[in-house]
Image (tube, rainbow, N blue to C red):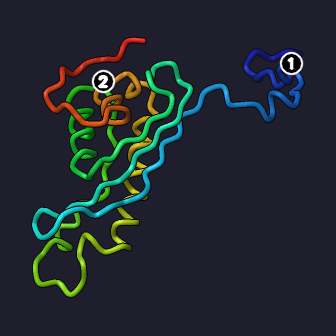
Amino acid sequence: MSDPAVADTRRLNSKPQDLTDAYGPPSNFLEIDVFDPQTIGVGRNRFTTYEVRMRTNLPIFKLKDSCVRRRYSDFEWLKNELERDSKIVVPPLPGKALKRQLPFRGDEGIFEDSFIEERRVGLEQFINRIAGHPLAQNERCLHMFLQDESIDRNYIPGKVRQ
């Protein structure tokens, strides 16, 4: 009475989990936080930077713990590099908020705390979605973005070798 069209529903045998497995360090992890926004400069030379901290045990990354400061235009650069050189679908960045940049507004525009926090959350979601993609993890531009103090915009695109 064994019909080949019916799927086998028996359970797979798995080893019982012990405390070391349950509460030990995860086998592979990648954590990226975008935090501590700081607005720098005055007038037309004013911009906001964000601290980007990465912690990982993935062997593809040369540093296991890094912290760099980036601005919105750096995130745009990363998005453009990945769209140009990789085979992944790159998620959108939070918007440019062009209306907030108009002169003679009654508020701080793009430098208002609520907007900066909203953008920070969007940038954190963006970088975590990118960095979590296995193909993106091999891209040199992502490694430079997450781990190098400054971005060399004249770098040679390519894959990272382990």
Q: Specify the farthest residue to the top.
A: 162
Q: Position of residue 91 (x, y in %)?
A: 34, 44
Residue 122 shows which numbered tag? Answer: none
Q: Amino acid at mark 1?
A: Asn
Q: Quadrant of residue 145?
A: top left
Q: Quadrant of residue 159?
A: top left
Disc with the residue nearer the chain's start (1 vs 2): 1
Say what secondary structure mark 1 lies in: loop
Residue 32 position (above or below residue 152) = below
**Crowd class of label 1 (few under 14; some 14 to 19; many from 20; radius 10 Å):** few
Residue at x-position 60% and y-position 27%: 28
Q: Position of residue 75 (x, y in %)?
A: 28, 45
Depth check: give the residue in front, 1 or 131: 131
Q: Position of residue 123 (x, y in %)?
A: 37, 52
Q: Quadrant of the C terminus?
A: top left
Nearer mark to the viewer, of 1 and 2: 2
> How many marks on residues?
2
Residue 125 position (above or below residue 45) = above
User: Which residue is disc 1 drawn over?
Assistant: 13
Q: Amino acid at mark 2?
A: Arg
Say what secondary structure mark 2 lies in: helix
Residue at x-position 16% and y-position 71%: 101
Residue 140 shows which numbered tag? Answer: 2
Image position of 15 (left or right of 29)? right
Residue at x-position 44% and y-position 55%: 35
